Image: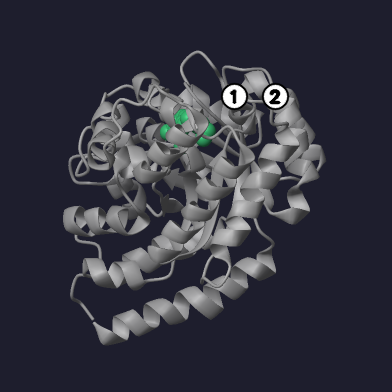
Amino acid sequence: MNQQPTRDEIRRAPKVLLHDHLDGGVRPATIIDLARETGYDRLPTTDVDELRTWFREASDSGSLERYLETFDHTVGVMQTREALVRVAAECAEDLANDGVVYAEVRYAPELHTSEGLSLDEVVEAVLEGFKAGSAGRNIRVGALLTAMRHQARSMEIAELAVRYRDVGVAGFDIAGAEAGYPPTRHLDAFEYLQRENSHFTIHAGEGFGLPSIWQAIQWCGADRLGHGVRIIDDIQVASDGTAKLGRLAAYVRDMRIPLEMCPTSNLQTGAASSLADHPIGLLRRLHFRVTVNTDNRLMSDTSVSQEFANLVETFGYGWDDLQWFTVNAMKSAFIPFDERLALINGVIKPGFAQLKWQA
Ligand SMILES: O=c1[nH]cnc2c1ncn2[C@H]1C[C@H](O)[C@@H](CO)O1
Ligand SMILES: [Zn+2]
């Protein structure tokens, strides 16, 4: 019971993933297949293992802007209906094989129209892929539609999210370089979503600090924060370990605003210097609503199980901590309350209870 969870046990635990990019989780072999089929000739290599390593190393740049350049290659091969269906189906399969029982996977429809697909066709292809990949597996996958923060299509994408809300789109997000592109640039889209009683998360506090988090929550009305690691800048820790929260950090904790934390990704973009120093340790200790996520499984060569295993190794977390992260994530999902509760009581708690009992 008190033993540390092993990798195999962690993989078997029922897990929840709220922050995962579809174009950041494509299988290397699929990228190579799709490049061949679609005539994309800019891949750095056509060897599967070399390509896997290339993505991981190119993403270790220490800067969000350079990290994002690697997406040119995945987005480059995801421009046809068939490619999108395949990538989405394989995403659902890979997550199910990792023991994920509920996932919200995001992508930016506007990035997949360069070969003539309409936004609606993009959304329908991805939903079809999620459905095919989930069929017969113990997983439910919903989509979050992302608008790119340096572009000006957020209103269109927000409308798309509302239009497909009853058939598998769980919510909306903005992503891309954060510095210079504050969330309020897209205020009209967020206000529209609020009028529609719709859900949205905002990447904030990753490549920029507290002003971005403050705008996302207090001005734009975000339900959750993508990353949010820089909330740490509003917390002072004394030498005896006691913490003093500033007003924004206190608000985030008091209102139980979910933090979609992605530790490995943060190390790669320079948002944190080491896992031991990652804000997740303090934020978990202070009972913020922390969730654990992958961000980009390809760029970070990771999975939810891998992220959990790293945390167990670094912070000595046990089963109760992993269950706490998981229940936090399920409570924070964008599906109806009764469905979240059914997954918590019918799948997550019994799954963890069995593993704890066996350990
Ligand atoms: O961690 C991230 N921060 C900001 N933007 C990101 C991150 N990971 C992926 N993206 C971008 C690149 C993708 O093309 C886009 C949609 O998934 O979202
Ligand atoms: Zn992200």
Q: CA distance from mark 1 to mark 2?
A: 7 Å
Q: Kindly identify the amino acid type of the residue bearing the numbered disc 1.
A: Pro
Query: Residue at the location (25% across, 62% down)?
Result: 317
Q: Quadrant of residue 150?
A: top right
SS at mark 2 in the image: helix
Does residue 279 show up? no
The reply to whether discs 1 and 2 touch (Cβ–Cβ < 8 Å) is yes
Q: Which colour style is shown? A: one colour
Query: Residue at the location (55% across, 41% down)?
Result: 83
Q: Kindly identify the amino acid type of the residue bearing the numbered disc 2.
A: Leu
- In the figure, 272 relative to 127: above or below? above
Coordinates of residue 343 in the picture (x, y in percent)? 56, 72
Q: Where is mark 2, residue-wise? A: 187
Along the viewing direction, whichever of 101 and 41 lies nearer the viewer? 41
Category of crowding for the residue at label 2, using alpha-carbon neighbours closer than 10 angstroms: few (below 14), some (14–19), many (at least 20): some
SS at mark 1 in the image: helix
Coordinates of residue 148 in the picture (x, y in percent)? 58, 25
Q: Where is mark 1, residue-wise? A: 183
Does residue 291 show up? yes
Coordinates of residue 313 in the picture (x, y in percent)? 17, 57
- In the figure, 8 relative to 145: above or below? below
Q: Is residue 172 left or right of residue 240?
A: right
- In the figure, 240 relative to 8: above or below? above
